[in-house]
Image (tube, rainbow, N blue to C red):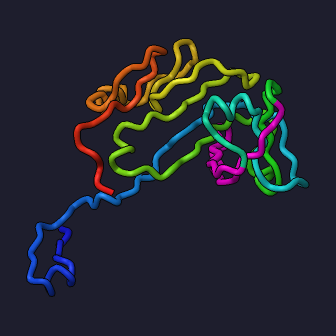
Amino acid sequence: MTEHTESSAARRDGEHRAPVRRPASLQRPMMIGKIHRATVTQADLHYVGSITIDTDLLDAADLIPGQQVDVVDVTNGARLTTYVIPGEAGSGQISINGAAAHLVHPGDVVIVIAYGMLSDYDARTFLPNVVFVDENNRIVEVHDDPGHAPDGYGLLDSGVPIEPYQAAGLVRTAAGRAVAEAHDVEPAR
């Protein structure tokens, strides 16, 4: 059981405050973008470490050059952290560079995941960019539910749809994308 105590400053001032379970400054590491089941096209051990990704895929997943990502190898179970280098648009390139080439090989199926720190308030309504690709790393679908699998993709959805859990603070744009609506109460900063 967690014991909550008052701050020493509050005790010195004679002020008594209720314990706080979740401070307003809480930051949550959240999945912000993912390229799902891409096929590795190249692995080069003698190269500056990183993962080179077709810029069309980077744009769809809202990833930028230099951004930290996890690479999860579905083929062999390896998992590693590296950073993104942009590849030629439309090339379908997914190239593993440097020491990671010992773990991930051409033809392996990988998931590339980026995380970001969001305030507790923002994390509750944030919608990630989840990019599904075909065997040639061409975009099949971009979605904002991390547990959704496109029809005909050969995967089952994971869990329950995320939208009902976030719907309290979301509205749909004309394009159909869900976005956070204005709230009457501003988050504590």
Q: Is residue 48 above or below residue 96?
A: below
Whole-percent x and y of residue 71?
65, 45
In this picture, residue 82 sits left or right of residue 89: left
Find residue 1 and report its image quarter.
Answer: bottom left
Which one is in front, 77 or 4?
Answer: 4
Report the magenta stretch's main SS: strand
Which residue is drawn at the image coordinates 67% and 21% (left, top)? 139
Which residue is drawn at the image coordinates 41% and 53% (left, top)? 28
In this picture, residue 124 sits left or right of residue 87: left
In this picture, residue 140 sits left or right of residue 98: left
Which one is in front, 31 or 19?
Answer: 19
Which residue is drawn at the image coordinates 59% and 19% (left, top)? 141
Which residue is drawn at the image coordinates 33% and 57% (left, top)? 189
Whole-percent x and y of residue 121?
33, 46
Give the magenta range: 66-88
* Residue 73 magenta: yes
